[in-house]
Amino acid sequence: MKVLVAGDSFKGSLTAFEFTETVAKVLRSHGAECRVLALSDGGEGSLEILTKLFDGRIEKTVASNALLNPVTVKTGITDKACFIESAQAIGLPQLKGNTDICQTSSYGVGEMIAFAVKHNLNDIVLTLGGTASDDGGAGMLCALGARFSDGQSDFIPTSGTLCRIKSCDLTPSIRLLEHTRVTVLSDVKNPLLGSNGATYVYAPQKGATADLLPFLEKSMEHYANIVNRHTHTDRTACPGAGAGGGLGFACMQLPHVTFLQGSNAILDMVNFDGLVKQCDWVITGEGKFDKQSYMGKIVGNVINRSKGKNIAVICGVADEEMYNDKNIKLLREIGKNKPDSLTNAKKYLTEETEKLFPLLSGC
């Protein structure tokens, strides 16, 4: 029996590597032939997954976190590309509980991109998930050479000081990336502004209170208008402009930038469709399996692209309605009615996979 084990992380309990390797270890002990793919949809944790998938190496450098303090960050270097994960620099975990969103900046993302360009790594894959900022990518553009002025001097805007901008010049950042190709992996389709935009949808997850949202939104709109006047374009309504607290919008101002749906792009990179053809079963999993799993997440796309094969899902918990999902043959929860499932996830995953194997071989 040939099995493709292709899954995501279980947030707070198992990495994607731990999930796939644990399942494969059990199945191999029963004689199954397993191919393992630890996957990500382009969010937090994607850097190490992508780098390992392409036999690359991790390199460390220093960049600014969302509060403009220096932190050590990782980039992934492979024969194909330089992988940069925005959350490495400006992710919420880097702030250690300090979530004053008005002080946050995406400057560190620009520093990581500039690091790649400096080392002649001119094919960059950038992920935008898990960021702590809401500055529309202004900080990133500054780190790449763009200038923002308040009428008296240049400054690095933060999420709370976008309203001070009187003028901008993006020309230096455009020139810096003139010979660089950037592929942005993001499953977020939100525009920059409005009730479905970066601020109202994602800023509350980054510490913004309800009474602060109108100010942040007005500041973002002001910033966007300044950029639009400078570039003679308006990309605020483009799908993905609101990704990463507006990093998507900033990326759209740069040359040679392509946006791809994160999860499907990663599946394409690893020749997922070809691997599916060679197997009898596909086993996938994530922390919570629900309707959201089919809205751009990696597990939903694994299932959609494995139709015609036997599919099993092992998850932490699942909504009841998912047991009626006709795309899958088997569904197992390792965390249901287990208060200690987060701390003992690997143990329960091993036990559930042992129970699952006879069902796989019996189909």
Image: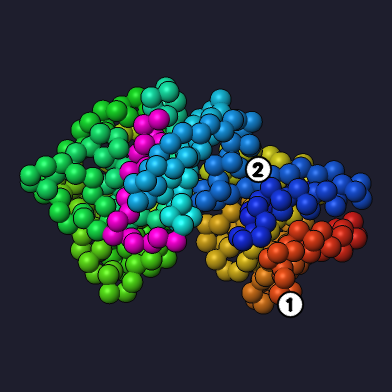
Which residue sits at x=23%, y=45%?
156
Q: Is residue 281 magenta?
A: no
Q: Quadrant of the C terminus?
A: bottom right
Please identify the dominant SS of the magenta region.
helix
Q: Nearer the viewer, residue 240 or 44?
A: 44
Give the labeled residue for mark 1.
337
Q: Earlier in the sequence, mark 1 or mark 2?
A: 2
- How many numbered marks are there? 2
- Judged left or right of residue 97, residue 49 is right
Q: Secondary structure at mark 2?
A: helix
Tag 1: amino acid: Asn
Q: Is residue 239 depicted above or below 86 in this figure?
A: below
Can I make out residue 259 in this image?
A: no
Q: Quadrant of residue 358?
A: bottom right
Q: Nearer the viewer, residue 198 or 234?
A: 198
Tag 2: amino acid: Phe
Measuring from the top left, give residue 44's x and y in whole percent.
52, 51
Looking at the rendering, the stretch of residues picked out in magenta corresponds to 97-115
Give the labeled residue for mark 2.
272
